[in-house]
Image (cartoon, helix red, strand yellow):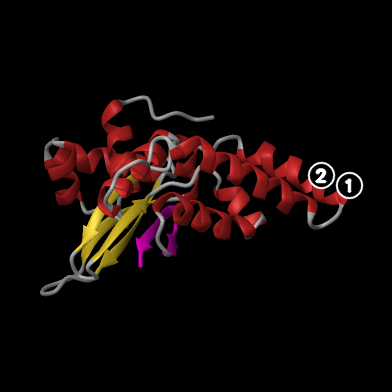
Amino acid sequence: MKKVTKNPKLLILTEIKRSQGLSVAELCDRVGLSYMGIKQHCIALEREGYLDTWRRPKGMGRPEKAYRLTQTAQEFFPTEYSNFTTEILDSVREIYGPSAADKILFNIYRNEIDKLKAGVSGLKLGEKMRQLAALRDERGYMSEYYFNRDHGRHEIVEYNSPILLCLDRFPILRDLEKQLFERLLGVDIQRNEERISGLYKCVFRGV
């Protein structure tokens, strides 16, 4: 596996991962390097296949150039052995029938709820969501808690999914993930997933 060896490059990849794409100027604000330093790193990362660019519309003036991750950049973020796990579940489905893998996944998520319960003990929804976001962040989901003033709702926004390959192969995981949030938070949850190029964003909103 090819590695980004310079820390500034990894910081750039991480900040872009926590977004839907960033310009050089926006990266300067987040990473704290000079404009030219950020630009040179982005050019190198694009040449190495980890970034691509597009022209992002602005309110006024010409569209600005922004960087986003490619699929190749996913190698720098946690995946929880998704390839191996997917192969196991495929084999279980093949040997024991179409519903066998779903039953295993259901059991895994039931146990995961039990493990997380102790860490989600707040009295108010915002407090519980902040606690759950911290636990999910430790597991590699790059989770952040927000109060969305536009919707008037509490949200957890995740910029990485360590089980992304499994999500694509076993769609039941999306429902199980939603149920996990609902059981731990005690409210109905909307789950909205966005994927653009190598960027991933999933919003869990209390309703």
Q: Amino acid at mark 1?
A: Ile
Please tell me how crowded label 2 is: few (under 14), some (14-19), or many (20+) other residues with Cα within 10 Å: some
Point out residue 148 in the picture as x, y percentages from the top left corner.
22, 62
Q: Is residue 39 magenta?
A: no
The residue type indicated by label 2 comes to Ser
Q: Would residue 13 be seen by someone viewing this image from the given angle?
A: no
State the extent of the magenta-drawn residues as a range. 189-207
Quadrant housing the C terminus? bottom left
Q: What secondary structure is the magenta-colored segment mainly? A: strand
Q: Quadrant of residue 199?
A: bottom left
Label 2 – label 1 distance at C-alpha = 6 Å
In the picture shown, does residue 81 fall above or below 62? Answer: above
Q: Quadrant of residue 62?
A: bottom left
Left or right, 37 with reference to 72: left
Labels 2 & 1 near each other (Cβ < 8 A): yes
Q: Residue at x 21, y 54 (%)?
A: 23
